[in-house]
Structures are given as structure tokens and as C-alpha cells.
Amino acid sequence: MFKLSHHHLFFLLVLPITTLFLLSCNSVNKNAVQLNGTIQNAGQTWIKLWKVTTTENILIDSTQIDNNEFDLTFETPERSFFLLSYKQKESILLCADKGESISISGNALDLEKNYTLSGSTESQVLWEYLKICSIYEQKIDSIGAFLNASQSEPDFPEIRRTLDSVFLDISSQLHSELFKFVELHDTAFATMLILNRAVAGKKVFDPVKDGELFRIVSQNLSTRYSGNSFYKQFSSGISKQEAHSDNSLPVAKSFEIGQKLPEINLPDISDNMRSLSSTHGKLILLYFWTSWNQECRERNIQLASLKEEYSDKGFNIYSVSLDTDTQAWQVAVRADKAYWPQVIDTSGLASGIAREFNVYQLPMMFLLDEKGKLLAQNIKLDELKRILMRTL
């Protein structure tokens, strides 16, 4: 009969523990992402890794660059977005999944615009996207610099109108190029971030005007990423937008020219109630908009130019935002320099005021006289300009 020696008994007792330990290690490692790289001229600086969510960036790891090289291993249970930051100024956007091994090569003197990567197809899509954005950001920065340098010029209003036109042309070109880029990569996970990302502080894609593109991307990703947390939020946002669109159909009759329009009384950017009737001027523009609508954001810039030119002659604006996010509205007002009476109805496109004024598209503008009587409804920008030139 075979007898267990003390040595055999010890081995059998230890074996299950060792096996459990190895299994435990394997269960951790199966979610691991290997990230390494070489960054020239980096010195002994620390590099940080952030997880990008829809609301914030969360610091998850960091390491010191040694002899221009770094090495990080981190875990992710699903495909997610990450930001590798250097000195809080330069950063690299990544889209990584468990099991990937990503290598980065760059130069610390201009890391964002001077790096290459391998080992991640989705991160490569982001790299190509950022290359396109970089070209247009340089153009937009040049416009901003020239605008700031021209503020003391006597013909500054004309300079600003010209630059606004150039800016809108560049924005249109950027939208066209990125639209084609997303169509080319409409099965890539990275396109969800691209569709919701701002370039030079301004979102390129509008969930209303570009709604079909959003839906195509969502449908293409639905099978593979239905359980992914980022995809769920992306898909949920599309569903909410479609629900808003369904509620935005016109239900009221058009107003008659010469009719005094109903009163509006809503909270302004300082959370004080402000009425339409408290806005004075020879000509008053009632303007409905939202911060997430690309055309509205462009209209803000155009109206800011008109306000600057004609405010001393009696032109004023009363804007009603149909945003549901107060913070997004406030950020947009400041970013667009839309400094005139601004109020918000957080009920959004389904609000009673939107229905009462038959707001079925955005932006929508009504022109009133000094007594609040309607001169023109759903007025276009070119028509507004002609009226201002003729009247004021």
C-alpha cells in the first residue's frame, strides 16, 4: 500500500493554494493593458494616465520617465478611453482594451503633434482624427490672435465681421472633412468620442443635424459593444435626442404681423427672473437656441457682431435657451461672447414656451418693434441684416 510521507502531504496541501494563487494572478492579468513608450527630451518627468468618462477624467496611474522611457500596466474590464498626460500640458488620447500592448514614440518638445503609436487600431483612429483637428486648430488660433491684435483698430467691427465669416468657413470645412472621416470609420469604437468631442472649444457634430450619422455609428456598434458602459451612454443620448425631436413638432398657429407677442419671464444667467418686456430697443430680436446645436453656436457669433455694430442705434436681443443643462448653457454664452439678455427654460424643446411660440426648429428668431409687436417671424440672418441697415 502506498503511504503518504510528510513531504507528499505538504505538497498536496500547498498545491491547491498555489493553484488558487496562479488562477488569481491570471484573472487579474486577463484585463491588463501594457503601455510603454519612448519620449525624447523628457528627462525625469512623471507621466500620468487618466480614464476618460463622459463627465470627467479620473487619474488611475502614473510613472516616472527614466532615460526617456516609461512602462505602465493597468487594468480595464472593457474597451475605454484614456489620456496619457505629460506635464499637464501635452497629452495623448488612447482607446484601449484588455490584452492590448501599446507602444508610443514621441518628443516632449511637442508631444501632442509629434508622436506615433502601434498595437491599438482604435487608438490609431484617434491619432488620425487628431492630426486633422490640429490643422484646423492652428487656423482658428491664427484667427483669434489676429482678432485680438486688431481690437484697437478703427475699423475693428468690419475686421471682426470678415474674420467671423472666415471662421464659419473653416468650421464648415472641418465639419465636412470629419464627417467623411467618421463615415470611413463608422464601425470604430473611437467614433463615439469623435462625435461628441469639441475642437477649439466648439463641438463639430450636432446630434440633430447629424442625427443620421450618430444613429449609423450606434447601430454598427450595437452588437459588439451592447454591454459597454460608454456605448450605453452614447446610445442613451441618441434616444433622448430623438424623444426631444418628437416633442418639437409645431402645435401653435403662426402669429400675425403687428400682433403683440406673449410675455416671457425666465431666469437669466445670474438666476434672476428676466422678462421679454424688460428688454428695450427700437428693434428687439427674440432668439430661441440651444448650446448643443452647431448652427445656434454659429448664430451666436454672428449676432454678437451685429449687436456690437447696432446696439448704440437701438438694436437689442433677448435669447431663450432650450437647454436642459444649465451649466452647458452658461459655458456656451461665455465661449460665444453672447453678452445680451439671456434666459433659459430647462424643460427643453418640449417646454410650454417653445410650443406657444411655435418653435419647431433651431435656431429660430422673431423681430419685434419697441412695443413688442411682431415685425417678422422665423426671420433669416440675411433678412435681419437688411432690416437693420435700412431701419437703423
Image: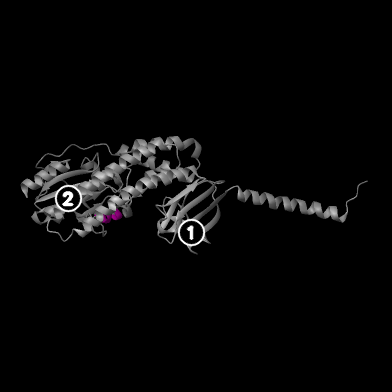
Q: Is residue 347 left or right of residue 41?
A: left
Q: Which mark is residue 48?
A: 1
- What SS does tag 1 mark? strand
Q: Are marks 1 and 2 in contact (CB under 8 Å)?
A: no
| Disc 1 from disc 2: Cα separation | 42 Å
Mark positioned earlier in the residue sequence (1 or 2): 1
**Which quadrant of the view contains residue 308?**
bottom left
The range drawn in magenta is: 330-336
Residue 362 point in image, percent of width and height? 25, 42
Density class for disc 1 (Cα within 10 Å; few <14, some 14-19, many ≥20) is some
What's under tag 1, amino acid-wise?
Lys
For label 2, the residue is 161
Residue drawn at x 72%, y 50% as measured from the top left = 19
Question: 334 or 362: which is nearer to us?
Answer: 334
Residue 260 appears in the rendering: no
The answer to whether 97 is drawn above or below residue 186 in the figure is below
What's under tag 2, amino acid-wise?
Arg
Density class for disc 2 (Cα within 10 Å; few <14, some 14-19, many ≥20) is some
Residue drawn at x 48%, y 59% as measured from the top left = 48
Residue 221 appears in the rendering: yes
Residue 107 point in image, percent of width and height? 44, 56
